[in-house]
Amino acid sequence: MSSTSKIGRFFVLSAPSGAGKTTLVNRLLKDIPHVECSISCTTRKPRQGEVDGVDYYFISTEKFQTMIGLGEFFEYEEVHGYFYGTPKGPLMERRQQGQDTILDLDTRGALSVKKSFPDSLTIFLMPPSLEVLEERLRKRQTENEASLQRRLKDAQDQLLEKEKFDRVVINDKIDRAYEEVKNIILNSLQ
């Protein structure tokens, strides 16, 4: 099938903060070469090791608001006090070119994509428990206590949404969860 006759597919991976979503996405991109990752915009500051234009486009709240006004986001949400959004242009261009894309989104963004594109495959990555999630977030050492508690509260809310996803994968062991997610994506491409 030529790239002009195939419409690209969206694979949306969602999880509470600290559940291992970004780690899995990075591994998937290395192992499934024909799938690209959508790069979101955010108003939060970069974490150590994050690169503008690779991990996110780090922009000001003012620029984000301007982009909203111009209709430049496919979807956007306010999460943990910051804005996150998926730029519409690059995503739609890849889809029209037949390019499959992984989107790393929060639950609201993921469900918004599914509503607009029912052929999207949504995967919810769950921590084995909230206690394990809290331990992972503390080990990251990227949050103050108030921010960590907000993320844990948000995680409880996000876990209530898991039944709305096409697949649910428990990340109890990263290698096992990775193989499961990879197989879900590869099987859906056949």
Image (cartoon, rainbow, N blue to C red):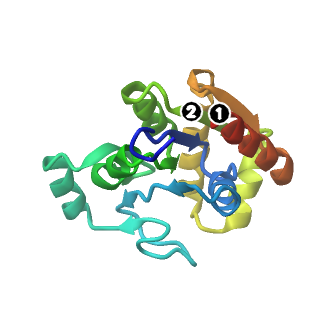
Please, what secondary structure does the residue beneath circle 2 have? strand
- Residue 47: x and y in percent read 53, 72
- Residue 112: x and y in percent read 40, 32
Residue 5, label in figure: none
| For residue 149, above or below residue 154 | below
- Residue 140: x and y in percent read 68, 66
Q: Nearer the viewer, residue 156 or 77?
A: 77
The kind of residue on which mark 2 rests is Leu
**Considering the image in quadrants, where does the C terminus appear?**
top right
Q: Nearer the viewer, mark 2 or mark 1?
A: 1
Q: Nearer the viewer, residue 96 or 70?
A: 96
Closer to the chain start, of discs 2 and 1, is 2
- Residue 35: x and y in percent read 56, 53
Q: Quadrant of residue 131?
A: top right
Residue at image position (14%, 48%) is: 69
Residue at image position (22%, 50%) is: 72
Inter-mark Cα distance, 2 to 1: 8 Å
The kind of residue on which mark 1 rests is Ser
| For residue 89, above or below residue 165 | below
Q: Which residue is mark 1?
A: 188
Give the class, few, some or many, for how many residues have Cα within 10 Å of label 1's Cα (few <14, many ≥20).
Answer: few
Q: Nearer the viewer, residue 115 or 83?
A: 115
Question: Do tag 2 and tag 1 residues touch (Cβ < 8 Å)?
Answer: yes
